[in-house]
Image (spheres, grey):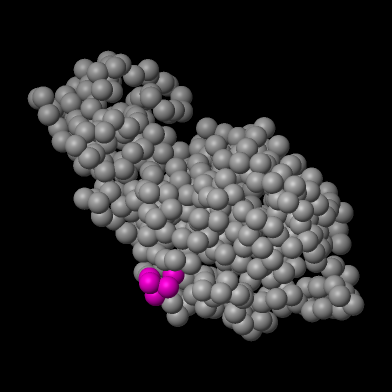
Amino acid sequence: MIRDLVIERPLCRSPISILIDDPSPGINPLYYFASTVPPKSTAYHYVSKDGEWYFDSDRSFGHPISKMVDPGFVLEFAKWVRQTDVRGKVSVVPYAAGLGRIDGNIEGVSRDQTLEFIRAISSIRNKFDVSSELLTHTRAVDLESMNLMGISEHDWSQTQTFETLAPYLALSLEILQNAGLDATGVTSPVDFGAKVEGEYAMAVLEAVKRVRKTGLAWYFLHVDQDSLMVPHRLMYLNQEAREAVVSIVASVKDPFWSSMLTDESEAEWRNEAIERVLSRDGKQGRIAQQVAAGSWVTLVTHWQSLYSNGKRFGLHAAKELVGRINRRLGERIVWMSCSEIAAYVACATAATFRVVEDGATVVVSSPFPCRNLTLSFSTTLPIKEVRHNGKALRRTNGSLTGGMWSRRGSLTSVAVPLLKELKGRYVARLGVS
C-alpha cells in the first residue's frame, strides 16, 4: 500500500540557475545608470571626469566605465550557453536608458547590431528564459508622453499601485514580444516594487496575462545571501483560475562584479572570485554549502560584470565556474530555467493526491503542468514495477532522471510529467506492483 507520499526537490537534487541582469544591445547599462540616475537613488556612487564615468570609490580615476559593449560579446556569450549545460534567465532592457526601444531604433546603436543581439538571445531561449528588466533601468517613463521623468524607475515604483504598475510592466513585455523575444517574466532593476510587493506581484501576473495569455508568472527581486536554505516563493495562487505568481530568490550575490575594478591579473582575480563560491574540490564555498544542505541554488550576475569593461574577465570566470559545478557537483544538481522553476513551485504547491485500487495506485493532479514532478513514498510490500499512466518506468540505481524510478532504503522515488490535461487539471496515474 502506498503511504507517506511527499513531493521532493526536482529529481531529488539541488536545482541551480544563473540569473543574468541588465543586457542591452550595444550599450553598457551601468554607464547610463551611473550617468543618468540621480545619485540619491542608488547605493552605488559614481563620478565623472573629462566625459568619462568612474566608480566613486576609485579615487585615482583608474577604472572608467565602458559606455558601449562591442558586438562580439553577445555572440561569445550565446555560443558558450549553447555549448554547455547551464540554465537560468537573461533579462533584456526593452527601452534601454530611454535611448530607444529594442523593437525599433536605439540611439548610438545600429539596427543591424540590435538585430544581431536579438538573434543571439533568441538562440539560447531553450536554456535561458528572457525577462524584461522593466522599461529603461534608469529613469521612469511617463507612459502618456513616453518622456523620461526626473526620478529613477525603482524609486518611482515604491509609491505605485496595481493600476499604474500593470500597464508599465505590460508595455515592457510587449516591446520584447514585438522584437521577437517572448519574455516569460519580469526582473526588478535595483529594488523595483519592493515596498509595494503585493501590488507588484499582481501587476506582474496581469502583464503576463495580457501579453502572453497565460496565468503562470514569475519575477526576480530578492537576494538572500545569508540563509542556507533559500527556496523560491509562491506569492499568489488561484487554483480555479489556474493562476500563480512565483518570486525567484537569488542565493548567491554577483561574484564577478569586482572584475570591473580589479588591478590583478585575470588568473589571480578569477581564482579568488570563483573560490569564494565553489572551491576547486567542490567541497567549500556558498554553492557547495547550499547543495550539501539540499537547497535551491540561484546565482545572480550582471551583463557589465561579465563584460568587465571589455576585458571579459567575468564571462571567462562564469565559464570556469559552470564547468567546475558540472564536474564537482554533477549528479547532485539539476540546471533549471526560471519558467521551469515557476512551473515546478506552482505545480508542487497545488498538487493533490488520491490513493485508489487497494492502495496500489495514486492519482496526482495539479492545475499547472510540470515535466519532472518528483515524488517519494513508502509501501508495505516490495516493489517490482512502477507504472506511469499504464506504462512501466525504467528503474535506476543511480541518480534519478525524468521518467524513471529509484529505491532508497524504504522510499521509492519517481520523476514523472504532469502534462495530460483532464477537466482543467494535469494528471498522472502511478501504479506499483
The quadrant the C terminus occupies is top left
The percent position of residue 378, horizontal first and vertical second, equals 24, 31
Q: Quick check: can you spot residue 227? A: no
Question: Within the magenta stretch, is there residue 70?
Answer: no
Please provide the residue range marked out in magenta.
Answer: 161-165
387, above or below 421, in the image:
above
Task: Tell me if 376 is positioned left or right of 112 in this view.
Answer: left
How many marks the image carries: the answer is 0
Task: Tell me if 88 is positioned left or right of 45 in this view.
Answer: left
The percent position of residue 123, horizontal first and vertical second, equals 63, 37
| Residue at the image point whose x is 71% and y is 44% from the top | 116
Task: Tell me if 251 is positioned left or right of 74 in this view.
Answer: left
**Magenta stretch: helix, strand or loop mostly:** helix
The percent position of residue 200, horizontal first and vertical second, equals 41, 68
Give the farthest residue toward the left: 358
| Residue at the image point whose x is 57% and y is 45% from the top | 180
The percent position of residue 153, horizontal first and vertical second, equals 56, 73
Task: Tell me if 181 is positioned left or right of 96 in this view.
Answer: left
Between 273 and 257, the residue placed more toward the observer is 257
Question: Within the magenta stretch, is there residue 164?
Answer: yes
Q: Quick check: can you spot residue 129? A: yes
| Residue at the image point whose x is 21% and y is 50% from the top | 240
| Residue at the image point whose x is 74% and y is 59% from the top | 27
343, above or below 421, in the image:
below
The quarter of the picture where residue 22 lies is bottom right
The quarter of the picture where residue 28 lies is bottom right
The quadrant the N terminus occupies is top left
